Image (spheres, helix red, strand yellow):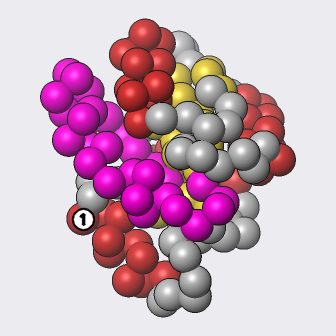
Amino acid sequence: MEKKKLVLGVIGADVHAVGNKILYHAFTEAGFDVTNLGVMVSQEEFIAAAIETAADAIIVSSLYGHGELDCRGMREKCDESGLEGILMYVGGNIVVGKQPFEDVEKRFKAMGFDRVYGPGTAPETAIEALREDLGK
């Protein structure tokens, strides 16, 4: 069976590399074909990589709190680029300050993200969701 392809990266001006490496190893060990873009990745870079690799999902992480700004409009850009309906996950410390996670999740889902994860979510949680969402 062909491996499902993921594009992984840390969006915006964020330089937090540790979580990115942990996710890369976890997803790879779980049997996914992962293109890791590293840190400080723009929406355009995520989309170009997803097109180039024929990715099944885009995994966006952010730790510096500005994920909400960095992610705004990404679904629309995906759609315009021919990636309509591509699975999009976002996780980490994605907003500034302490906010109820339910509110944060609602806002990111309204932006077109399929799954939203708060800080400290285990990679296994996303792996299970990916298997479910990708029918694997």
Name which residue type carries label 1.
Answer: Ala
Q: Would you say residue 35 is visible in this rendering?
A: yes
Q: Is residue 117 visible?
A: no
Q: Position of residue 111 (x, y in %)?
A: 27, 58
Q: Which residues are magenta?
A: 62-90
Q: Is residue 14 left or right of residue 116?
A: right
Q: Quadrant of residue 65?
A: bottom right
Q: Secondary structure at mark 1?
A: helix
Say which quadrant the N terminus sits in.
top right
Q: Which residue is mark 1?
A: 110
- Of residues 91 and 126, the one nearer the viewer is 91
Residue drawn at x 24%, y 65% as measured from the top left = 110
Between 74 and 123, the one nearer to me in the picture: 74
What crowding class fits label 1: few (fewer than 14 Cα within 10 Å), some (14-19), or many (20 or more)?
Answer: few
Residue at 40% from the left image edge and 19% from the top image edge:
48
Q: Position of residue 35 (x, y in %)?
A: 61, 22
